[in-house]
Image (cartoon, coloured by chain):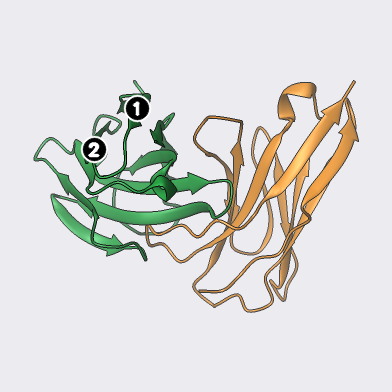
Protein backbone atom coordinates (compact mmCIF):
# COMPACT_ATOMS: atom_id res chain seq x y z
CA UNK A 1 0.00 0.00 0.00
CA UNK A 2 1.24 3.47 -0.82
CA UNK A 3 2.65 5.33 2.14
CA UNK A 4 2.07 8.88 3.32
CA UNK A 5 4.54 11.18 5.03
CA UNK A 6 3.53 14.16 7.13
CA UNK A 7 5.19 16.33 9.78
CA UNK A 8 5.25 14.82 13.24
CA UNK A 9 4.07 17.96 14.93
CA UNK A 10 3.01 21.55 14.31
CA UNK A 11 2.32 24.51 16.55
CA UNK A 12 -0.11 27.35 15.93
CA UNK A 13 -2.06 30.08 17.69
CA UNK A 14 -5.75 30.66 17.90
CA UNK A 15 -7.19 32.43 14.89
CA UNK A 16 -4.41 31.44 12.52
CA UNK A 17 -4.74 29.32 9.40
CA UNK A 18 -2.96 25.99 9.61
CA UNK A 19 -1.75 24.06 6.59
CA UNK A 20 -0.62 20.46 7.02
CA UNK A 21 1.08 18.94 4.01
CA UNK A 22 1.17 15.25 3.27
CA UNK A 23 3.47 13.56 0.75
CA UNK A 24 2.33 10.48 -1.15
CA UNK A 25 4.75 10.01 -4.02
CA UNK A 26 3.51 6.53 -4.91
CA UNK A 27 -0.19 7.32 -4.95
CA UNK A 28 -2.16 4.99 -7.21
CA UNK A 29 -4.74 6.02 -9.77
CA UNK A 30 -7.59 4.67 -7.67
CA UNK A 31 -6.47 6.27 -4.40
CA UNK A 32 -8.51 8.97 -2.74
CA UNK A 33 -6.81 11.25 -0.21
CA UNK A 34 -8.57 11.24 3.14
CA UNK A 35 -7.93 13.13 6.35
CA UNK A 36 -9.00 12.11 9.84
CA UNK A 37 -8.77 13.96 13.16
CA UNK A 38 -8.29 12.25 16.50
CA UNK A 39 -8.59 13.63 20.01
CA UNK A 40 -7.00 11.78 22.95
CA UNK A 41 -8.87 8.64 23.98
CA UNK A 42 -11.39 9.02 21.16
CA UNK A 43 -11.80 7.37 17.80
CA UNK A 44 -10.69 9.21 14.65
CA UNK A 45 -13.18 11.47 12.95
CA UNK A 46 -13.43 11.95 9.19
CA UNK A 47 -12.59 15.49 8.10
CA UNK A 48 -12.41 15.60 4.34
CA UNK A 49 -11.65 13.53 1.26
CA UNK A 50 -10.67 14.37 -2.28
CA UNK A 51 -9.25 13.03 -5.52
CA UNK A 52 -7.83 16.10 -7.26
CA UNK A 53 -7.90 19.91 -7.24
CA UNK A 54 -9.67 21.47 -4.29
CA UNK A 55 -12.35 20.26 -1.94
CA UNK A 56 -13.95 22.39 0.74
CA UNK A 57 -16.44 21.62 3.48
CA UNK A 58 -17.59 23.40 6.60
CA UNK A 59 -14.46 22.60 8.60
CA UNK A 60 -11.53 22.38 6.17
CA UNK A 61 -10.17 22.61 2.66
CA UNK A 62 -8.08 20.06 0.85
CA UNK A 63 -5.72 21.12 -1.90
CA UNK A 64 -4.37 18.50 -4.30
CA UNK A 65 -1.98 19.46 -7.12
CA UNK A 66 -2.28 17.98 -10.57
CA UNK A 67 0.39 15.30 -10.00
CA UNK A 68 -1.37 14.20 -6.77
CA UNK A 69 1.95 13.42 -5.11
CA UNK A 70 1.09 15.62 -2.18
CA UNK A 71 -1.91 17.22 -0.55
CA UNK A 72 -2.49 20.02 1.93
CA UNK A 73 -5.13 20.14 4.60
CA UNK A 74 -6.05 23.72 5.43
CA UNK A 75 -7.78 24.58 8.70
CA UNK A 76 -8.99 28.20 8.72
CA UNK A 77 -8.85 30.18 11.95
CA UNK A 78 -8.00 27.36 14.34
CA UNK A 79 -9.18 27.33 17.92
CA UNK A 80 -7.91 25.53 21.02
CA UNK A 81 -10.34 22.71 20.31
CA UNK A 82 -8.53 21.94 17.06
CA UNK A 83 -5.60 20.57 19.07
CA UNK A 84 -5.51 16.96 17.92
CA UNK A 85 -3.67 14.46 15.77
CA UNK A 86 -4.38 14.71 12.05
CA UNK A 87 -3.93 11.68 9.80
CA UNK A 88 -3.50 11.68 6.05
CA UNK A 89 -4.51 8.42 4.39
CA UNK A 90 -4.80 6.99 0.92
CA UNK A 91 -8.11 5.25 0.50
CA UNK A 92 -8.71 2.89 -2.38
CA UNK A 93 -12.34 2.48 -1.46
CA UNK A 94 -11.74 -0.60 0.63
CA UNK A 95 -12.40 -0.55 4.34
CA UNK A 96 -8.80 -1.22 5.36
CA UNK A 97 -7.61 2.23 6.34
CA UNK A 98 -3.84 2.49 6.75
CA UNK A 99 -2.96 5.17 9.28
CA UNK A 100 0.49 6.71 9.44
CA UNK A 101 1.97 8.44 12.46
CA UNK A 102 -0.10 11.56 11.93
CA UNK A 103 0.63 15.20 12.70
CA UNK A 104 0.18 16.37 16.25
CA UNK A 105 -1.22 19.91 16.09
CA UNK A 106 -0.99 22.07 19.18
CA UNK A 107 -3.00 25.29 19.19
CA UNK A 108 -2.04 27.82 21.85
CA UNK A 109 -3.92 30.90 23.08
CA UNK B 1 -28.94 9.13 14.93
CA UNK B 2 -26.88 7.43 17.63
CA UNK B 3 -23.19 6.95 16.94
CA UNK B 4 -21.08 3.83 17.13
CA UNK B 5 -21.13 2.35 20.61
CA UNK B 6 -18.56 0.06 22.12
CA UNK B 7 -18.73 -1.96 25.30
CA UNK B 8 -17.13 -2.15 27.69
CA UNK B 9 -15.20 1.12 27.64
CA UNK B 10 -12.50 -0.16 29.97
CA UNK B 11 -11.32 -3.67 30.70
CA UNK B 12 -8.54 -5.18 32.78
CA UNK B 13 -7.46 -8.76 32.16
CA UNK B 14 -4.49 -10.93 33.02
CA UNK B 15 -2.17 -12.76 30.69
CA UNK B 16 -3.59 -15.97 29.29
CA UNK B 17 -7.20 -14.92 29.63
CA UNK B 18 -9.50 -14.21 26.75
CA UNK B 19 -11.67 -11.18 26.13
CA UNK B 20 -14.68 -10.27 24.00
CA UNK B 21 -15.37 -6.70 22.92
CA UNK B 22 -18.65 -5.54 21.45
CA UNK B 23 -19.52 -2.94 18.85
CA UNK B 24 -22.90 -1.63 17.76
CA UNK B 25 -22.69 0.26 14.48
CA UNK B 26 -24.74 3.24 13.46
CA UNK B 27 -28.25 2.16 12.53
CA UNK B 28 -28.34 1.12 8.88
CA UNK B 29 -24.60 0.62 8.59
CA UNK B 30 -23.64 -2.85 7.47
CA UNK B 31 -19.86 -2.68 7.52
CA UNK B 32 -17.92 -2.91 10.77
CA UNK B 33 -14.15 -2.62 10.99
CA UNK B 34 -11.86 -3.09 13.96
CA UNK B 35 -8.59 -1.32 14.69
CA UNK B 36 -5.96 -1.59 17.39
CA UNK B 37 -4.18 1.54 18.60
CA UNK B 38 -1.00 1.43 20.65
CA UNK B 39 1.62 4.11 21.34
CA UNK B 40 4.28 2.05 19.59
CA UNK B 41 2.45 0.78 16.50
CA UNK B 42 -0.19 3.45 16.07
CA UNK B 43 -3.53 2.62 14.49
CA UNK B 44 -3.60 -0.76 12.81
CA UNK B 45 -6.40 -2.46 10.92
CA UNK B 46 -7.57 -5.78 12.35
CA UNK B 47 -10.47 -6.89 10.16
CA UNK B 48 -13.71 -5.85 8.52
CA UNK B 49 -17.08 -7.54 8.46
CA UNK B 50 -19.90 -6.91 6.05
CA UNK B 51 -23.16 -8.83 6.01
CA UNK B 52 -21.78 -11.30 8.55
CA UNK B 53 -18.75 -12.11 6.37
CA UNK B 54 -15.16 -11.14 6.94
CA UNK B 55 -14.16 -9.05 3.93
CA UNK B 56 -10.68 -7.83 4.87
CA UNK B 57 -8.09 -8.91 7.37
CA UNK B 58 -5.03 -7.19 8.76
CA UNK B 59 -1.74 -8.70 9.78
CA UNK B 60 -2.59 -10.00 13.24
CA UNK B 61 -2.21 -13.50 14.70
CA UNK B 62 -5.08 -15.95 14.81
CA UNK B 63 -5.67 -15.13 18.47
CA UNK B 64 -7.61 -12.16 17.18
CA UNK B 65 -10.97 -13.08 15.74
CA UNK B 66 -14.31 -11.51 15.15
CA UNK B 67 -17.80 -12.04 13.98
CA UNK B 68 -20.81 -10.08 12.90
CA UNK B 69 -24.43 -10.78 13.63
CA UNK B 70 -27.45 -10.37 11.40
CA UNK B 71 -28.25 -7.02 13.03
CA UNK B 72 -24.71 -5.82 12.04
CA UNK B 73 -23.49 -5.77 15.62
CA UNK B 74 -19.97 -7.13 15.86
CA UNK B 75 -17.80 -8.76 18.46
CA UNK B 76 -14.07 -9.09 18.60
CA UNK B 77 -12.34 -11.81 20.59
CA UNK B 78 -8.75 -12.05 21.71
CA UNK B 79 -7.64 -15.34 23.20
CA UNK B 80 -4.58 -16.12 25.31
CA UNK B 81 -3.95 -12.47 26.08
CA UNK B 82 -0.42 -11.13 26.06
CA UNK B 83 0.94 -7.97 27.66
CA UNK B 84 1.37 -6.48 24.18
CA UNK B 85 -2.35 -6.72 23.56
CA UNK B 86 -2.89 -3.77 25.86
CA UNK B 87 -4.34 -1.15 23.57
CA UNK B 88 -7.30 0.96 22.59
CA UNK B 89 -9.53 -1.15 20.37
CA UNK B 90 -11.61 0.91 17.99
CA UNK B 91 -14.62 -0.08 15.99
CA UNK B 92 -15.75 1.80 12.90
CA UNK B 93 -18.89 1.46 10.84
CA UNK B 94 -19.92 2.58 7.40
CA UNK B 95 -23.03 2.11 5.27
CA UNK B 96 -21.37 -0.16 2.74
CA UNK B 97 -18.14 -1.99 2.22
CA UNK B 98 -15.85 -0.15 -0.10
CA UNK B 99 -16.77 2.40 -2.70
CA UNK B 100 -15.69 5.95 -3.14
CA UNK B 101 -16.11 8.50 -0.38
CA UNK B 102 -16.81 5.72 2.04
CA UNK B 103 -16.43 7.53 5.34
CA UNK B 104 -15.90 5.41 8.41
CA UNK B 105 -17.46 6.42 11.71
CA UNK B 106 -15.44 5.45 14.73
CA UNK B 107 -16.65 4.60 18.19
CA UNK B 108 -14.98 5.78 21.41
CA UNK B 109 -13.01 2.56 21.77
CA UNK B 110 -12.44 -0.03 24.46
CA UNK B 111 -9.31 0.45 26.55
CA UNK B 112 -7.90 -3.02 27.30
CA UNK B 113 -5.18 -3.42 29.88
CA UNK B 114 -3.45 -6.78 30.22
CA UNK B 115 -1.60 -7.38 33.47
Residue pointed to by mark 1: B11
Whether residue B59 sits left or right of residue A10 in the image: it is: left
Give how far across and how far down residue B20 sits, in percent: 22, 37
Q: Position of residue A56 (x, y in %)?
A: 67, 44
Query: Disc 1 on helix, strand or loop?
Result: strand
Q: Where, by quadrant of the figure, is residue A16 drawn?
A: top right
Camera-side residue: B85 or A13? B85
Residue B107's spot in the image, x, y percent? 40, 32
Image position of B61 (left or right of B18): right
- Which chain is home to disc 1? B
Colour in which chain B is drawn: green
Disc 1 to disc 2: CB gap under 8 Å: yes
Judge from the rendering whether residue B81 lies leftward or rightward of residue A19; answer left or right: left
Q: Colour of chain A?
A: orange
- Secondary-structure class at tag 2: strand
Residue drawn at x 20%, y 58% is B54
Numbered badge on residue B19: 2
Up the image or down, B103 lies above or below B4; here it is below
Amino acid sequence: LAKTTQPISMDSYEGQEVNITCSHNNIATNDYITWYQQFPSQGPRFIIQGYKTKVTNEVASLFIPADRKSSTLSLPRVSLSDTAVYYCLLNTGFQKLVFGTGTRLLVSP
Amino acid sequence: KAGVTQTPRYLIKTRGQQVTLSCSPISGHRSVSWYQQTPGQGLQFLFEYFSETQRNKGNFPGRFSGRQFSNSRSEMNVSTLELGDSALYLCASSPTSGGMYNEQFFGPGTRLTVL
